[in-house]
Amino acid sequence: SAWNRDGTKMLMGKYLLDGKTYQVIKSLPVSGEFRWSHTDPNKILMIDSSWIFRSYNVVTGVSTNIRQFSGYDEIRMGPWERNISNDDGFVVLSGRNGTDYTAIVFNIKANIIESTKTFPGKWEAGIDWAGISPSGRYVVMNMAYCNPSCAGQVDSYDRKMNFITQIAPKGEHGDMT
């Protein structure tokens, strides 16, 4: 959502707006991919261009580094259909090593990697997006194995990345509720 949890603020790109009047409050000094916190209306959670997962308070400007992810050529939140569990406890990050795709289930509160699963050769023409369920119990992935413009099946895993079931035989954009 563009709005924070109480509807008082809104993000449009890097611009923070008043959630009621839509007036620009300020431009945020953030880079990378970010989402509003589900528990703090003044906080966004993000993975920045240095592969640091951090929180940023849009009112005070205080940035808190949570974890540096190393050992990957690139780290993304999701990408695209990214989300954080409703308690701000879990997120799925996508790591690239060459053409290999690794789903990284990150426990934000405990600052630990719960699990990973690598899909060899699937970065460019493989996985379209990955996300955590609102409860934080499941990982959902769009397995677009044919090419980046071709939608593939949507699969579910538990947080340890054990396959559970195919949710849909074909999927494209997805949001979880």
Image (cartoon, helix red, strand yellow):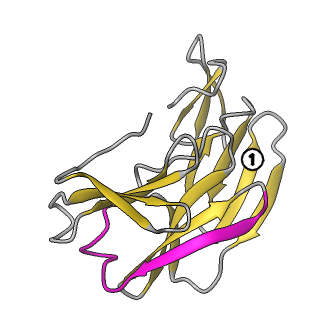
Indicate the position of residue 161 as horizontal and vertical percent values.
Answer: 49, 68
Residue 122 vs residue 59, the one in the foreground: 122
Residue 3 coordinates in the image, percent (x, y): 56, 26
Whether residue 172 is visible here, answered yes or no, is: yes
* Residue at the spot 58% in from the left edge and 36% down from the top edge: 15
Seen in the picture, residue 59 relative to 147 is either above or below; the reply is above
The image quadrant that residue 101 belongs to is bottom left
Neighbour tally class for label 1: few under 14, some 14-19, many 20 plus, Cα within 10 Å = many
123 part of magenta stretch: yes
In terms of secondary structure, where does tag 1 sit? strand
Say which of 119 and 169 sits in front: 169
Count of residue discs: 1
Q: Position of residue 92 (x, y in %)?
A: 53, 60
Whether 136 is drawn above or below 139: the answer is above
Vertical arrangement, residue 58 with respect to residue 66, above or below: above
Please tell me which residue lies in front, 131 or 98. 131
> Which image quadrant for residue 87?
top right
Of all residues shown, which one is farthest toward the front?
164
Dot 1 amino acid type: Tyr
Residue 31 seen: no
Vertical position of residue 133 compared to residue 151: above or below: above
In the visual, does 96 lie left or right of 23? left
Left or right of residue 31: residue 174: left
Whether residue 116 sits left or right of residue 53 in the image: it is left
> x, y (%) of residue 90?
63, 53
Question: Which image quarter is the C terminus in?
Answer: top left
Tell me if residue 2 is in the magenta stretch.
no
At 46% from the left and 57% from the top, the residue drawn is 78
Magenta region: which residues?
Answer: 110-128
Residue indicated by mark 1:
56
